[in-house]
Image: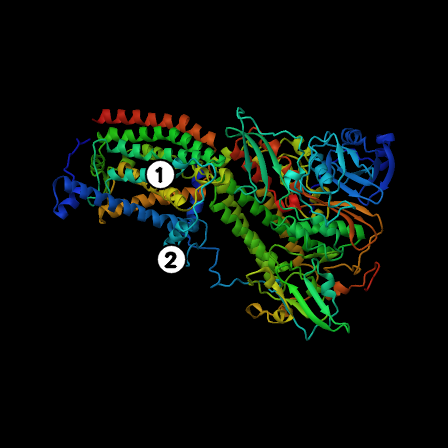
Amino acid sequence: MSVELPDTTGVAEQSPEEIADLLGDLVIGREEHLNAPGFVIKPDTVVETLKRLRDDAGFDHLSCVTAQEYEDRFESIYHLTKFDDRTQEVSIVVPADKENPVSQSANEVFRTADWHEREAYDLVGINYDEHPDHRRILLPETWQGHPLGKDYDQDQPQVVPLREHQNPLLEDQQADNQSETMYLNIGPHHPATHGVLHIKAVLDGEQVVDLEPDIGYLHRCEEQMCQSSTYRYQIMPYPDRWDYISAGLLNEWAYARVAEDMADIEVPEYAQIIRTMGAELCRMAAHFLALGTFALDIYGDFTALFMYSIRDREKVQNILEDLTGQRLMFNYFRLGGVVWDLPEPREDFFENVRDFLDELPTALEEYHDMMTSNEILQMRTVGTGVLPPEVAKSYGATGPVARGSGVDYDLRRDDPYGYYENLDWDVVTEDGCDNYSRLLVRMREVEQSAKIVEQCIDLLEDWPEDERNIQANVPRTIKPDDDTEIYRAVEGAKGELGIYMRADGTEKPARFKIRSPCFSNLQTLPEMSNGEYVPDAIASLGSLDIVLGEVDR
Amino acid sequence: MIGLLKGMATTMKHALDGKTFTVKYPETAPEVSPRFRGVHKFSQERCIWCRQCENVCPNDTIQIVMDDQRNGEQYNLHIGQCIYCRLCEEVCPVDAILLTQNFEFTADTKDEFVYNKEQLKNVPWYKGIDPLNSRNPDRGAWIGEGDGEVDYQ
Amino acid sequence: MVGPLQSEVVLFPERIANLLGLSGTLGEIVGALIGAFIVGNIMLAMTGVAGPWAKRKITAAFTDRIAVDRIGPFGLLTIVTDSVRLLSKELIIPEGADRPSYDIAPLILPASALLGFSVIPMGSGIQLADPEAGLALVFAFASIASISLVMGGYASNNKYSLMGGLRAVAQNIAYEIPLIVTAMSVVVFAGSLQMSTIVAEQTSTLVSLGGISIPAWYAFVNPFAFVLFLVANMAEIGRNPFDIPEAPTEIVAGYQTEYSSVYFVLFYLGEFLHVFLGGAIMATIFLGGPAGPILPGFVWFVIKIWAFFLFTQWCRSALPRVRIDQLIEIGWKGMLVLSFANLVLTAIIVGVIA
């Protein structure tokens, strides 16, 4: 009874020494991160290093780019891993000069570096050479300074009017009236942007010629907030608010995993099962909402399907409320376990969950009747918003978006955590690469999640009463050693949700970086929609299932 | 064509069965779970003014003012700013602060959401549920003596 | 087929004139004015019920909700409060709006629909006019609507509005032709464009099943044409799955994006009137007009057009919206061909039988 492991025979496994040999004299130093070996390289050899690692060692997934400032230098860390074997990781550390922080852009090797480096420039202030689009991304263009930098003055005026900021030498860039295209602002207030997203679209008639998502409207300094909270308790409530569409426990797990690995905390098995069950319930709730809102985009407002999926999501939320005490912002995980055991009487809780699981096939049947078997929906979604697997990998797309493009990648199986490896379930993939495939992946993942929850319920029901240990013994204050660095990820509702943390010997992290799956997934939108009709671009956006709270953080 | 008809049949089935999943609020007050976290209730009789809740609060929602003899004077809580994480209840050694099930609160301005200790005391139990009876704060885990470095502050 | 029975229909204005004891030109004018007033108000009243209340209730039923129930019995007084709310809102006119056409557009939409009702026989003797070319006239009136949409879309000085207006025109042209060609097959059966004749033709019995005689409604005589007309009609009035001129999730609200307050009400009203006019045309040429057992004719007529309204809402709850290019393709490559095939087929059947 265990999940089928991926076929990793074709993937060569490299020891740190082999990687060092491969990189040769590019390496100017070594670091040891808790999750992976770190190689320090010169700032002007980024492209060469990453290319060598990608082409010769198979590190084809640039999971995240972390930027930070030390007392004496700036640093960008490229967290590399493999789509075929997630357990192999390597960190490429690129120091940059304190006075004039310039580093080569990795955009040429991994397209996903584009946005990640823009964010690093925006928040920390490292300049990336040869970057095709070196602008701020989260903060407005007129923002003064880089907020996560050390010399940032919080008291100075942070935004200046555009006229003060603008380069007076810049010519008026209005398109001439003879042009055949039309510029259209979709959002930030638009019925189909799923939050405050602004899309700059250039249209030729009804067809999209060029499209650029403009994000940052919901930037809430989540990283900075975590950096000013203590590891032990204060950070945990915040992950709920990144992806606030019912995926709270999945996000909490991302933090729990990284902090537990950093502080070396062993979570009791019983707590792991409860975590697994809660997380999968959250995934179902999040996917229900994804289905419902996708239906809104395709069907128009007031489609019955939206309400039906909300109804099913409500059922999940009732269960989660019984378990955690809240419907959205759970704050249920603690380092070393969970805060509460299952609610008493346990029989009632099990019955509620089982009732929900029993009704689920009927509900899914309804969804299939109304969505997947619907000819107009097929006409609208099959073959539109195509995202080829290679492009998806280059952009670091993960989760249902990658799996809809046939990329067999799921952290629950590939980098096992929790209780997943002892349960019987499958990773769902579809090869269509289009909006329809992504829809199907989500629908089938709900079934798989139900399967997991069912097994967890069976396990919990039979668990001996005196071994119900929900929390490990965790010291009241956690102070990891100075300069401990770790990057860990879990499979969130939308994909790979990773967190990088660096400790500085205090009880608060010195750097807390969130790798949001939606951020990377949204980056693929122009690839999917260029050349398509406006309605299909909207549908593609819906099929990405982004949450702006997580994109902007 | 069959797919379209199947979809239409599904919605018609829902229309005809007459069932609704929304309720007539406020006539039908929703059932909340015993663990649900709503507005705080504060008991000055129990409070020992240890300030642990103030320290643990992630976003400085709780403000405690004491005189120079360390006697408590004020206990203010901004229920509009609170993120309802329940850490204050969890940390409190004497159950002086509790989160009731009450989620219905309104005010004209944000400032009115700053509750002082009198207002906090007068927060009603929702449907008479006393959360202490149903919610069992896990103190063992909180004070836990682990194998690692233990630091009682 | 029976020949045209030119039954002497006494029209509604004439009756009013007779009732008032007026005759001659004065009688005609007064009768026509009062008649038009009554018919127009009946239609507007129905729209008033449909827009703020019935539509919400119907949608709620499909989506398992309760919907408006706070004001009055079954929430019926919502109609009053909603009207007050909508009318008392500020009228916001965008900068750079093309003034005369921006103001006229919301008037044309309901007016075109109301004009269409003038030739519809509503039973119980309510029919304002019965010209020889009644059917052609009603289509002519109905298609004025697209002018209003393109005017509103163009004059709003908003790109979404413009796209909505253009979509509306493309859609109307693509579906007007199949709509009228399909309607012509009915004319081939009836042998007349006159509404009263078409209705009268449908009163005969098609078949008798165990004592229940099924009337020769053209929906039963030629179901294929009925379905074609239904689809084309949905597109013509812009309802799901063909609601692309508005397409809220794509182009915000299409041509009516920039309209607020009274202008919005007029647009909203006009759309519902067009739904009812579409239902009225369907009822007249395919469902025997006001015919039906026991209840008076007018009641049957109202039931039929409300059934059509219900059908549009039903589709809205379950059917996805097609894309603009797919819509045009269905219109020109599918519907047009099918409607001509239907016309030829009908002509052959009529020719063989007659």
- Which quadrant of the view contains residue C304? top left
The numbered mark 1 sits on a residue in which chain?
C
Residue C74 - label: 2
x and y percentages locating residue A385 in the rendered image: 57, 33
Against C69, residue C268 (above or below) is above
Is any atom of residue C123 visible in this view?
no
The total number of labels drawn is 2
Q: Indicate left or right for C36 with B111 as reference.
A: left
**Taking A367 as reference, is B89 above or below it?**
below
Q: Does A362 sit left or right of C36 as displayed?
A: right
> Dot 2: few (<14), some (14–19), or many (≥20) neighbours within 10 Å?
some
Identify the residue at image location x=39%, y=50%. C87
Residue at 53 percent of width and 50 percent of height? A310
Image position, residue A222 (x, y; %): 69, 49
User: Which residue is farthest bottom?
Assistant: B45
**Rendered view: C84 above or below A202:** below
Q: Is residue C17 visible?
A: yes
Q: Is residue A422 above or below residue B153?
A: above
Secondary structure under tag 1 reads helix
Please tell me which residue lies in front, A54 or B110.
B110
**What coloring was used for the rendering?**
rainbow
Residue neighbourhood size for the residue with mark 1, other residues' Cα within 10 Å, grouped as few (<14), some (14–19), many (≥20)? many
Identify the chain of the residue marked 2, using the numbered disc in the image: C
Q: Secondary structure at mark 2?
A: helix
* Mark nearer the viewer, 1 or 2: 1
User: Pointer 1 and pointer 2: residues touching (CB < 8 Å)?
Assistant: no
Which numbered tag is attached to residue C109? 1
Query: Quarter of the image holding residue A63?
Result: top right
